Image: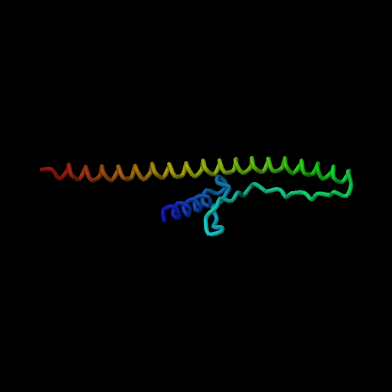
């Protein structure tokens, strides 16, 4: 139950944070997953083995594909890191606010007790 609430909270934060948090949390396969918004997964190229030249061209396309997968993986890491920073900042800020509210409540009650002394 707690992890579900946290995931729902995180999904809301990702949506509420707008451009600061690029990815989002979605339900997929009975669980929640993070989905990037600015990274496009490359498609594997077709391999042509009809002759040596076609195979060489296929190898060149494959090498470009490997480079694009590396760029995709960097994009995922960068976007996830930005989202993590945003989420941690929001959570830490919320905790500080809640703590300050609790302390302020204690101070209000303390002031009431002091005034109530004869």
**Horizontal and vertical percent for residue 81?**
56, 40
Picture quarter with the C terminus: top left
**Horizontal and vertical percent for residue 36?**
60, 49
Query: Looking at the image, which residue is at 52% across and 54% down?
Result: 32
Q: Where 29 sits versus 106, above or below?
A: below
Q: Quadrant of residue 95?
A: top left
**Horizontal and vertical percent for residue 87?**
49, 45
Q: Is residue 1 left or right of residue 85?
A: left
**Horizontal and vertical percent for residue 5?**
44, 54
Q: Is residue 53 left or right of residue 3?
A: right
Query: Looking at the image, which residue is at 56% across and 58% down?
Result: 28
Q: Is residue 36 left or right of residue 113?
A: right
Picture quarter with the N terminus: bottom left
Tally the numbered discs. Answer: 0
- Residue extending farthest to the bottom is 30
Viewer-proximal residue among 34 and 59: 59
Query: Looking at the image, which residue is at 89% across and 47% down?
Result: 51
Q: Where 12 sits versus 56, above or below?
A: below
Query: Looking at the image, which residue is at 23% across and 45% down?
Result: 109
Colouring scheme applied when the structure was drawn: rainbow
Viewer-proximal residue among 99 and 51: 51
Q: Is residue 101 left or right of residue 115?
A: right
Viewer-proximal residue among 15 and 114: 15
């Amino acid at each position: 139950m707690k992890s579900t609430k946290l995931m729902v909270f995180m999904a809301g934060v990702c949506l509420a944070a707008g451009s600061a948090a690029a990815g989002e949390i979605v339900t997929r396969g009975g669980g929640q997953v993070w989905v990037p918004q600015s990274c496009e997964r490359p498609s594997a190229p077709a391999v042509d083995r009809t002759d040596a030249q076609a195979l060489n061209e296929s190898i060149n396309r494959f090498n470009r594909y490997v480079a694009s997968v590396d760029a995709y993986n960097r994009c995922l890491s960068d976007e996830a890191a930005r989202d993590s920073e945003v989420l941690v900042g929001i959570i830490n800020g919320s905790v500080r606010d809640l703590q300050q509210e609790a302390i302020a409540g204690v101070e209000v009650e303390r002031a009431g007790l002091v005034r109530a002394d004869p």
